[in-house]
Image: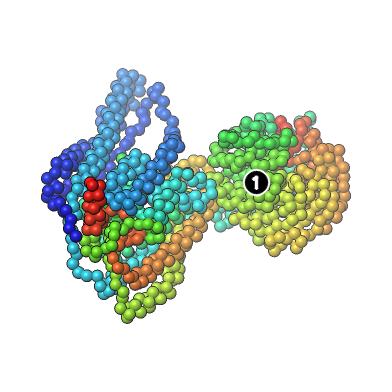
């Protein structure tokens, strides 16, 4: 316990440094010193992306091999630490597969945006690997996952119903992220990446607080960001359900020893399930029928909320914000000017054109908000239906969608232990 | 089954385990020390303003009282430099300290994890059994939790939506007008009103060559310096026509290496600014195949008053604000155009329309609308035409605005808001350069050397080749200049000076007249007079009626290819070397 308090103290101390701000005005008197022109940073050399892509593919391959063949938690941790250092600290968390959703959404809805090839690979490669080998990406390649995994000291089990409910947040986050990116407003996932502040040793106060909060929660709740918020995880979950090969707790037949039941800190070990009695089966069918009828209602409700929210969501777009601000200033509803409104006025641009642009953007948010709301309504309805479908399962299994392939459960399985001993004996001989 | 199980107590006695744990503790302690030092440094930076030390402030106040005290100034400089050096040292300390801190955290974590991974997991056999009742209970709890979460999210969404609505209303008030442009609310913007007294694009706001402005001069002479208000040099060649918005005249000029937009003061002809659109430096870009008769700047620019856009034969397009600041620039790629790309731009409200027809076969052409403020694409639509040299025109109909275009073989109308094709008629062929016009509800397009066609604009949409055709009439049609109409007659003008008049009602020829001019500029209708500009700079002014009647001739001394532009009381002519302003001289 004392050790845990020490970790928490360390994190809090780290957060204090975030108060520091850099401020220094230029000299107020004339001198020969030439203040350098503000310049745009040069783009990264192409070789950096090539190396990043090569390492990503190699890491994905290694993660798949380690989780499916080698079945070694130690090696997975090694790969995880390497990924944390390379993709996190060395590459400063960018490009990352999670954030690439924004680029993909922008490219899909804006033909003007040229999608970098490296970003496309970072988006697609983990999906393809997941489709074949399960979530090896989450296990050992994603630096965000690694950051949370290494600090998990005293895991607390999240009750299954609460887990299912909280997972809805990830769908909501994904919908907002796509909507904001598609409308050219902002890359939400990148803007609020909770760990990028650590990777770059830089960030504003809010981001430090967000990151440290996530780390503190991660001490006790396994990978909270991955399980309840990660929008990329939403996609990976669906692909993992149908993956060709995936992690198995036991390398052979399950002996029902139940030692692995408490092994997974992410609640991804699912218990055997017996067939329901006929009365319950009939009740389940009635529940499913009711929920199917409810599905269009949920979709319509979601669409309506999405349409009603669109003015507020559109405020995230800088042009809409500026148009609102200028109108408010012209009407005398607010005092003073913001930097943006001052710059706009100084530029002499036409307010009317700004308003027209804002109207066009709001319309895009209206359409996008309705689509996102309908999609979320259908997903929520689908989850309710899924929870009512009776399941029959004979042995303990890693959850098809929820298993991060972290390899913690391997060591708990006596069959796996026997396999290792047998293997060790064979090697010795 | 038997296994060799090693007790964790034995593992913890191993030197490797103890070494790793020790390393982890040492790194953690160092991390704590680094964090404390960083916290102190961060706090100092937070609370102290290095540029506002008491001593520095005091010296500055003294210097204001004694501005000529060089010694004091020198003292301030020294102090300022010292303060800055300290500040930079502190910043460097924080930067280095952060790296140390991160490194110590990573080392502590890695050693701790490595040590923990050496331990065997303590087996825990859970109590209880999995039974259907538990499964049913769990499923019900899951549904309840999901439903509650949904309800909460829905309630938050509803609350946000309801509270956002009044905010939205408040944030879009009818503004207190500060200027005419700012006072116009969105809902009442009327493009027709905005451009009524402007000449924003090729052949005027509606691209029909009709000047609806008062007091246009009808007699001038450069040799006698009569009615020449000013004349300014045009630095680069180009066949594009000038455009006018309020007190600004814009035109383009280009060579193979330079592409420029010039802005002149309409009052005195002063060149206010020159905007440069850098030729696309894409490696391996093919040199554009441009005929000398077309040149690199045959495309007339377009403006909505706030922004002005220009495109060149290279496919490079750019947009400037009215003060000449480049807003955006794009390279659309060198269009495959047999004689060189010469299509002019059109502007509608906040969009600039680019008819990008290219290729010897259909498949490459498209029409695009860029948002004029930032150059993003508002819409783009494929066009079933090969390369053409006509220009898009904006027209106002009973049902709203349309973009008219013509190419081989289609005359097409588009929705300017979405780019959706509204109707099309197949009537043209081969290389088309004269631009279509709208006159008395009829779209008039012409096939060079062959025929004139008229289609009713109140058509029902789709392919209206037969259903909307009003008439077609044979004649000696021009291959360069566009037609002009007063709503009763329509006139065409060939390069060799053949002026033809047709009845707009049925397309029958009313008269033909051979002018002793070579004409490249399109004719213009000013009131009830035709303005027919010759290549030699002579302008014939003729009565617009059912018989030809020459009312007079005026002249400038330089060759002219571009069509004239107009402002109230003024006419602007572009010659090969100069820009003329013609009007009443004060």
The residue furthest front is: A429
Q: Quadrant of residue B235?
A: top right
The residue furthest bottom is: A279
The residue furthest top is: B71
Q: Nearer the viewer, residue B90 or B366?
A: B366
Asked if residue B15 lies left or right of residue B423, the reply is left
Instruction: Provide the residue designation for mark 1.
Output: B356
Name which residue lies at 45% across and 61% down.
A372
Asked if residue B481 lies left or right of residue A402, the reply is right
Q: Regarding mark 1 in the picture, which secondary structure is present there?
A: strand
Q: Position of residue B287 (x, y in %)?
A: 64, 34
Q: Position of residue B246 (x, y in %)?
A: 63, 42
Name which residue lies at 74% across and 43% down.
B216
User: How many other residues sit within 10 Å of disc 1, few (<14), some (14-19) or many (≥20)?
Assistant: many
Q: Position of residue A225 (x, y in %)?
A: 32, 54
Q: Position of residue B9 (x, y in %)?
A: 12, 50
Q: How many marks?
A: 1
Q: Nearer the viewer, residue B554 or B88?
A: B88
Q: Nearer the viewer, residue B186 or B293?
A: B293
- Residue B300 visible to an observer of this rendering: no
Query: The disc numbered 1 marks a residue on which chain?
Result: B
- Tell me: residue A223, above or below residue B245: below
Name which residue lies at 43% across and 70% down.
A295
- Residue B340 visible to an observer of this rendering: yes
Asked if residue A267 lies left or right of residue A319, the reply is left
Q: How is the image coloured?
A: rainbow
Name which residue lies at 60% across and 44% down.
B305
């Amino acid at each position: 316990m004392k050790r845990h308090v020490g970790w928490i103290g360390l994190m809090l101390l780290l957060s204090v440094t975030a108060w520091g701000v850099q401020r220094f005005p230029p000299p107020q008197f004339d001198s020969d010193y030439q203040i350098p022109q503000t310049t745009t940073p040069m783009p990264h050399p192409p070789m950096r992306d090539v190396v990043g892509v090569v390492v990503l593919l190699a890491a994905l391959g290694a993660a798949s091999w380690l989780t499916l063949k080698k079945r070694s938690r130690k090696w997975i941790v090694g790969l995880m630490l390497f990924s944390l250092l390379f993709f996190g600290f060395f590459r400063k968390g960018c490009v990352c597969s999670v954030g690439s959703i924004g680029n993909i959404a922008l490219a899909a809805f804006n033909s003007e945006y040229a999608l970098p090839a490296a970003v496309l690979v970072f988006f697609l490669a983990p999906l393809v690997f997941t489709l074949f080998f399960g979530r090896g990406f989450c296990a050992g390649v994603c630096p965000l996952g690694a950051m949370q995994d290494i600090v998990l000291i005293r895991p607390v089990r999240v009750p299954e119903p609460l887990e299912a409910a909280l997972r809805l947040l990830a769908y909501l986050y994904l919908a907002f992220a796509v909507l904001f990116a598609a409308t050219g407003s902002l890359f939400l996932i990148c803007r609020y990446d909770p760990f990028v502040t650590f990777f770059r040793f830089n960030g504003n106060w809010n981001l430090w607080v967000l990151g440290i909060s996530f780390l503190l929660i991660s001490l006790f709740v396994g990978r909270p960001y991955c399980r309840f918020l990660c929008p990329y995880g939403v996609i990976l979950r669906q692909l993992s359900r149908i993956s060709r090969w995936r992690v198995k707790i036991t390398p052979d037949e399950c002996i029902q020893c139940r030692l692995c039941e408490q092994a997974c800190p992410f609640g991804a070990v699912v218990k055997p399930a017996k067939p329901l009695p006929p009365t319950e089966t009939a009740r389940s069918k009635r529940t499913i029928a009711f929920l199917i009828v409810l599905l269009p209602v949920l979709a319509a409700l979601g669409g309506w909320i999405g349409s009603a929210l669109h003015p507020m969501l559109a405020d995230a777009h800088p042009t809409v914000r500026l148009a609102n601000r200028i109108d408010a200033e012209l009407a005398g509803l607010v005092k003073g000017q913001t930097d943006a409104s001052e710059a706009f006025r100084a530029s002499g641009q036409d307010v009317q054109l700004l308003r027209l642009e804002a109207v066009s953007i709001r319309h895009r948010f209206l359409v996008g908000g309705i689509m996102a709301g309908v999609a979320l309504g259908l997903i929520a309805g689908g989850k309710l239906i899924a929870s009512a479908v009776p399941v029959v399962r004979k042995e303990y299994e890693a959850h098809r969608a929820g298993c991060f392939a972290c390899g913690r459960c391997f060591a708990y399985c006596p069959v796996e232990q026997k396999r290792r001993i047998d293997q060790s004996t064979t090697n010795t001989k | 089954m038997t296994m060799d199980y090693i007790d964790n107590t034995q593992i913890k006695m191993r030197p490797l385990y103890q070494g790793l744990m020790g390393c982890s503790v040492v790194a953690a302690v160092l991390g704590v020390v680094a964090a404390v030092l960083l916290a102190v440094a961060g706090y100092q930076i937070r609370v102290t303003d290095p540029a506002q030390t008491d001593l520095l402030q005091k010296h500055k106040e003294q210097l204001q009282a004694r501005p000529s005290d060089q010694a004091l100034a020198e003292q301030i400089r020294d102090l300022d430099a010292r303060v800055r050096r300290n500040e930079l040292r502190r910043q460097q300390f924080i930067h280095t300290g952060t790296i140390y801190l991160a490194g110590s955290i990573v080392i502590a974590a890695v050693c701790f994890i490595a040590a923990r991974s050496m331990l065997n997991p303590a087996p825990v056999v859970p109590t209880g059994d999995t039974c259907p009742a538990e499964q049913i209970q769990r499923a019900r709890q899951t549904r309840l939790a999901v439903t509650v979460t949904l309800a909460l999210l829905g309630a938050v969404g509803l609350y946000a939506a309801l509270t956002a609505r009044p905010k939205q209303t408040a944030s879009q008030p009818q503004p207190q007008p500060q200027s005419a442009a700012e006072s116009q609310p969105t809902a009442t913007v009327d493009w027709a009103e905005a451009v009524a007294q402007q000449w924003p694009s090729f052949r005027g706001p509606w691209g029909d060559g009709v000047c609806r402005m008062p007091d246009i001069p009808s007699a001038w002479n450069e040799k006698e310096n009569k009615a020449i208000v000013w004349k300014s040099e045009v630095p680069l060649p180009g066949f594009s026509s000038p455009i006018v918005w309020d007190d600004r005249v814009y035109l383009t000029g280009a060579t193979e290496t330079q592409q420029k937009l010039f802005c002149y003061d309409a009052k005195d002809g002063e060149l206010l600014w020159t905007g440069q659109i850098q030729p696309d430096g894409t490696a391996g870009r093919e040199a554009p195949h441009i005929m000398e008769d077309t040149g690199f700047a045959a495309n007339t620019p377009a403006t909505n008053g706030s922004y002005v856009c220009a495109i060149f034969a290279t496919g490079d397009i750019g947009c400037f604000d009215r003060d000449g600041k480049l807003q955006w620039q794009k390279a659309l790629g060198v269009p495959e155009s047999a004689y060189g790309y010469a299509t002019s731009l059109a502007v509608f409200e906040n969009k600039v329309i680019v008819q990008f027809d290219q290729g010897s076969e259909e498949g490459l052409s498209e029409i695009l609308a860029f948002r004029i403020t930032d150059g993003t694409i508002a819409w783009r639509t494929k066009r079933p035409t090969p390369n053409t040299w006509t220009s898009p025109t904006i027209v106002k109909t009973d049902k709203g605005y349309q973009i008219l275009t013509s190419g081989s073989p289609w005359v097409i109308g588009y929705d300017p808001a979405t780019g959706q094709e509204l109707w099309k008629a197949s009537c043209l062929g081969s290389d088309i350069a004269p631009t279509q016009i709208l006159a008395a509800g009829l779209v008039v397009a012409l096939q060079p050397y062959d025929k004139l066609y008229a289609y009713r604009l109140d058509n029902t949409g789709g392919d209206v080749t037969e259903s909307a055709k009003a008439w077609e009439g044979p004649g000696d049609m021009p291959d360069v200049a566009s037609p002009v109409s007063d709503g009763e007659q329509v006139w065409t003008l060939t390069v060799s000076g053949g002026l033809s008049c047709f009845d707009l009602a049925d397309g029958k020829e009313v008269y033909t007249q051979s002018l002793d001019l070579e004409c490249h500029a399109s004719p213009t209708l000013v009131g009830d007079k035709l303005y027919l500009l010759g290549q030699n700079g002579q302008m014939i002014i003729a009565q617009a009626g059912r018989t030809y009647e020459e009312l007079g001739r005026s002249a400038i001394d330089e060759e002219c290819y571009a069509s004239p532009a107009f402002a109230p009381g003024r006419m602007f002519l572009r010659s090969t070397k100069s820009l003329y302003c013609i009007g009443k001289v004060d």
